[in-house]
Amino acid sequence: MLLADDSLIVREGLRALLGMTKDIDVVGVAGDYD
């Protein structure tokens, strides 16, 4: 899964929550479209 949001706290929160599941791997995080 790739997380994209302009808010750092939202990105880190979602990354932490999704990291607790065994079925989902966060492979990238972005603050904008670049």
Image: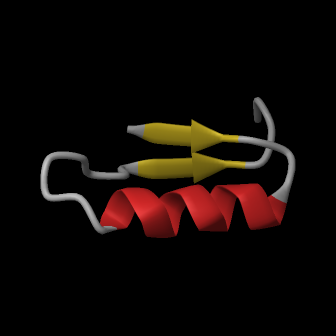
Q: Seen in the image, is 14 located left or right of residue 1?
A: right
Q: Residue at x 39, y 56 (%)?
A: 18
Q: Which quadrant of the view contains residue 4?
A: top right
Which of the two residues, 32 or 6, is positioned nearer the viewer here? Answer: 6
Q: Residue at x 67, y 56 (%)?
A: 11
Q: Seen in the image, is 3 located left or right of residue 28?
A: right
Extreme-left residue of the structure? 22
Query: Residue 30, position in %: x, y?
Result: 67, 47
Extreme-top residue of the structure? 33
Query: Residue 32, position in %: x, y?
Result: 80, 38
Q: Seen in the image, is 34 located left or right of residue 24?
A: right
Query: Residue 27, position in %: x, y?
Result: 36, 50
Q: Is residue 32 above or below residue 17?
A: above
Q: Quadrant of the N terminus?
A: top left
Q: How is the image coloured?
A: secondary structure
Q: Residue at x 14, y 58 (%)?
A: 22
Which of the two residues, 25 or 21, is positioned nearer the viewer here? Answer: 21
